[in-house]
Image (cartoon, helix red, strand yellow):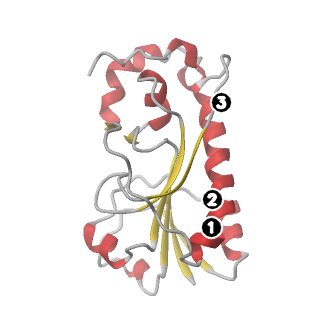
Amino acid sequence: MRILLLGPERIWLKDFLESFGDQVIQYQDKLDENSSILNDVDFIISYGYRYIIKPDIVRKFKNKAINLHISYLPWNKGADPNLWSFLEDSPKGVTIHYIDNGLDTGDIIVQKEVQYHKDDTLRTTYERLTQTIEQLFMEYWPLIREGKIRGIPQPKGGSYHKLKDKEKYLHLLTDGWDTPIRNLIGKAKNNK
């Protein structure tokens, strides 16, 4: 199988995927339906990819394109899911889902809630989410790869955030990503 891995370079993930005998192409730039990189690709995995995948590509790879998202969908679709899970005090966790034409709206393959500790920071929670999604992916990839796992539609509701939405809360990040989460919990809950 030929896999297109979208997002920042992750050597361990490429090595893991290649351990199944597959060829992996890593790519970070914006895709369009005429990109030659798509030639002979069988499956797409998006993890930390900054661009929206166009509908023509989504159609071509129906049930053959997944996203690893560090939120407990349907909450915190879009940008900065870890930050928003604290600002809005919403469910915290990770989700692997099929890619559809919406932003983080595809059918859920697997998800897991993640617990936090009172002394955690945005950095430590991000690291925990990353470890959890990567372990979940390694556990479920053989089933996903073989087409033996179906997604289930996301529940109604949840939340969505754009990159610019966090601007009015940046003053709360007194220590950047080392800001304690206890200083953020619920700060945006009533400001919608």
Q: Which residue is mark 1?
A: 141
Q: What residue sits 35% from the left and 38% below the top?
A: 158
Q: Which residue is mark 3?
A: 124
Instruction: Relative to 7, say whether 174 is above or below.
Output: above
**x, y (%) of residue 95?**
51, 50
Q: Residues within 10 Å of mark 2 (few under 14, many from 20)?
A: some
> Marks 2 and 1: CB-CB under 8 Å?
yes
Q: Secondary structure at mark 1?
A: helix
Figure quadrant of the C terminus = top left
**x, y (%) of residue 175?**
56, 17
Q: Amino acid at mark 2?
A: Phe
Q: Is residue 71 left or right of residue 1?
A: left
Q: Residues within 10 Å of mark 1 (few under 14, many from 20)?
A: some
Q: Amino acid at mark 1?
A: Trp
Instruction: Relative to 96, say whether 183 is above or below.
Output: above
Q: Amino acid at mark 3?
A: Thr
**x, y (%) of residue 111?**
55, 49
Q: What residue sits 61% from the left and 31% below the top?
A: 125
Which mark is in front, 3 or 2?
2
Q: Secondary structure at mark 2?
A: helix
Instruction: Relative to 49, say whether 94 is above or below.
Output: above
Dot placed on the residue nearer the N-terminal end, 3 or 2? 3
Q: Which residue is mark 2?
A: 137
Q: Secondary structure at mark 3?
A: helix
- Quarter occupied by residue 88: top left
- Quarter occupied by residue 14: bottom right
Q: What residue sits 61% from the left and 71% below the top?
A: 143
- Frontmost residue, 99 versus 127: 99
User: Which label is found at residue 171?
Assistant: none
Alpha carbons under labels 2 and 1: distance apart: 6 Å
Dot placed on the residue nearer the N-terminal end, 3 or 1? 3
Alpha carbons under labels 3 and 1: distance apart: 25 Å
